[in-house]
Image: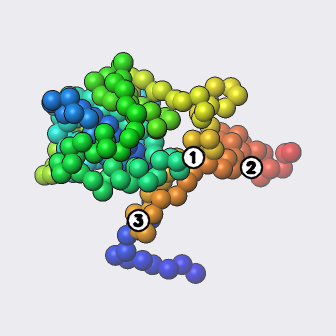
Amino acid sequence: MRKDFEDDMIVTPLPVLMIATYDEEGRLDVMPCAWGGQCGAHQVAVNLGSHQTTENIKARKAFTLSFATKNTAKISDYFGVVSAKDMPDKVEKSGVHVFKSTHVDAPVIDEYPLTLECTLADMQEEGEDVRFVGNVVNMSADYSILDYNGFIDLSRLQPLVFDSSTSSYHVVGDKVGEAFRDGFEFKLQLEGFR
């Protein structure tokens, strides 16, 4: 049996992406975005409405994209419920540690252990909705989230996903399989090999 939800909200786990920018005067801003992700080998896309961040990306042609984590859940939500248009110094008041990227004209927030540094590649506007595509020119990671081989370990990062149907955050982390390997093993089992 299955239940049809018809007009109810779609449940799609969405990454909680933190977009950090500078405005034309150099004031920094950060906001969460759930409508985005990787869209190419070295590109990301985010969909925003009418926000200070939207204006900042248009002006500076750069942004950083960090992953909200279990440890940054409350401050990440704070950055979403407090608008830079109403409180321009919200980032300073939060107490996070910020430094300017050496690769793009955008800030990096030290509390977020994984950050993509992006230049604006494309922008598509439809009414108040804007889709930004960024070229990822650098990815920086805190050593605390790396495994012994120097790769990103999601169980150490503990990135958040957003459930839009319940307006709640959940954590990603447990490794449950090996991509491009488990399927081949299953195929061999189906073919009678072990």
Callout 1: 10 Å neighbours few (<14), some, many (20+)? many
- The front one of 68 and 137 is 68
Q: Earlier in the sequence, mark 1 or mark 2?
A: 1
Of discs 3 and 2, which sits in the foreground? Answer: 3
Q: Amino acid at mark 3?
A: Ser
The single residue placed furthest to the right in the displayed view is 194
Of discs 1 and 2, which sits in the foreground? Answer: 1
- Secondary structure at badge 3 equals loop
- The front one of 135 and 185 is 135
Q: Amino acid at mark 2?
A: Phe
Alpha carbons under labels 3 and 2: distance apart: 36 Å
Callout 2: 10 Å neighbours few (<14), some, many (20+)? few
Q: Earlier in the sequence, mark 1 or mark 3?
A: 1
Q: Which mark is residue 167?
A: 3
- The front one of 111 and 186 is 111
Q: Is residue 194 left or right of residue 52?
A: right
- The front one of 127 and 162 is 162
Instruction: Using the rendered view, name the quadrant where residue 124 is placed.
Output: top left
Q: Earlier in the sequence, mark 3 or mark 2?
A: 3
Q: Is residue 20 left or right of residue 2?
A: left
According to the image, label 1 marks what residue?
Answer: 158
According to the image, label 2 marks what residue?
Answer: 186
